[in-house]
Image (spheres, helix red, strand yellow):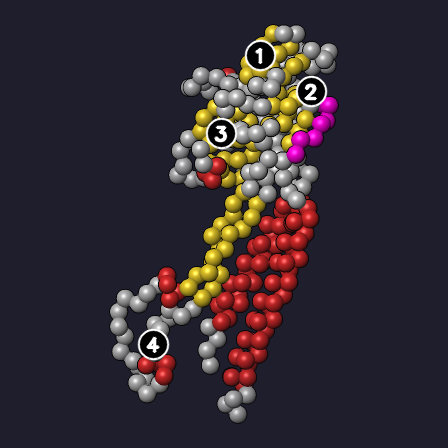
């Protein structure tokens, strides 16, 4: 008895479990500013197409149908995980009234200096640290636009006084000023291919291994002071996907149980 279908059932179960984990993570970040939803990509791996036979094998049992139509292991099919991709579509803008909150309306990422180096984020919920620097909620400095070669520690934005008095202003183009005196322009960068980005936690993105930092400054940025960009997660869609994945997972579990029952009968019942 052939139980090759077990490969399909098990791989399908694992795929739906991964899909559930991704959906749960999206739902847990529905209120995270600037969060971008993730999705899983799957495909059917058909060994008949992916691994054609290279050599002709002599049938071991000439009288059997199986040996006459020897597939050489190329008749298996299962679910293959291609990976995770992020949906970078624009989230909604929510007014907070906080002068240090910034929302990107359109393309671009903020540059921030982390212990691992310069990273990128869409989360514009900023504050001031003890040195008067504009920082993320993790305490990582937000960087200003500067000439190439300037180290990150020289690109921080120090506000000091002016915030409490209400004289702080951040223009649509990211120009930071206090009482009309410019303190620099917040750096917004964009990537020709956003697929080079990978999530590293805390709402920041890094670059995937073996990818050069091919990004450019956004020529005409659009920032909204006193706003934050909300998550682009659609709760209804995510709940629908979760129900669908749960039902498919249950179906694959039943298929696995059926194959297990057939194997049990083959081993314990048929020989008797």
Give the numbered dot on residue 190: 3
- Compare residues 196 and 224 and report the one nearer the observer: 224
Secondary structure beneath disc 1?
strand
The residues colored magenta run 92-98
* Mark 4 crowd level (few <14, some 14–19, many ≥20, 10 Å Cα): some
Can you give x and y, in whole percent of width and height, for residue 174 in the image?
Answer: 58, 19
Which quadrant of the figure has residue 214? Answer: top left
Cα separation, mark 3 vs mark 4, equals: 53 Å
Q: Is residue 146 visible?
A: yes
- Compare residues 31 and 138 and report the one nearer the observer: 31
Mark 1 — residue? 183
Secondary structure beneath disc 3?
strand
Give the numbered dot on residue 174: none
Mark 2 — residue? 99
Question: Magenta span has 118?
Answer: no
Give the mark nearest the N terminus, 3 or 1: 1
Secondary structure beneath disc 2?
loop
Q: What residue is at 62 percent from the left and 12 percent from the top?
A: 177
Can you give x and y, in whole percent of width and height, for residue 263 in the image?
Answer: 52, 79
Cα separation, mark 1 vs mark 2, equals: 15 Å
Mark 4 — residue? 70
Q: In front: mark 3 or mark 1?
A: 3
* Mark 1 crowd level (few <14, some 14–19, many ≥20, 10 Å Cα): some
Secondary structure beneath disc 4?
loop
Q: What residue is at 59 percent from the left and 39 percent from the top?
A: 36
* Mark 3 crowd level (few <14, some 14–19, many ≥20, 10 Å Cα): some
């Amino acid at each position: 008895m052939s139980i090759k279908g077990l490969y399909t059932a098990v791989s399908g179960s694992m795929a739906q479990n991964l899909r559930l984990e991704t959906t749960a993570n999206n739902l847990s970040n529905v209120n995270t500013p600037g969060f971008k939803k993730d999705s899983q990509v799957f495909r059917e791996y058909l060994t008949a197409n992916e691994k054609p036979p290279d050599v002709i094998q002599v049938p071991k049992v000439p009288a059997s149908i199986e040996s006459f139509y020897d597939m050489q292991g190329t008749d298996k099919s299962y679910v293959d995980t291609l990976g995770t991709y992020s949906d970078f579509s624009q989230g909604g803008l929510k007014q907070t009234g906080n002068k240090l909150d910034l929302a990107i309306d359109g393309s671009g990422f903020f540059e921030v200096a982390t212990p691992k180096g310069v990273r990128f984020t869409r989360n514009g919920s900023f504050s001031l640290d003890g040195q008067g620097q504009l920082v993320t909620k993790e305490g990582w400095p937000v960087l200003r636009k500067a000439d190439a070669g300037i180290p990150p520690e020289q690109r921080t934005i120090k506000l000091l006084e002016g915030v409490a008095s209400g004289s702080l202003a951040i223009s649509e183009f990211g120009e930071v000023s206090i009482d009309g005196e410019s303190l620099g322009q917040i750096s917004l960068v964009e990537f020709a291919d956003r697929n080079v980005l990978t999530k590293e936690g805390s709402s920041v993105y890094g670059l995937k291994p073996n990818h050069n930092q091919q990004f450019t400054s956004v020529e005409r940025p659009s920032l909204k002071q006193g706003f934050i960009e909300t998550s682009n997660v659609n709760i209804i869609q995510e709940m629908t996907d979760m129900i669908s994945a749960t039902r498919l997972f249950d179906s694959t579990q039943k298929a696995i149980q059926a194959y297990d029952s057939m194997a049990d009968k083959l081993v314990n019942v048929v020989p008797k």
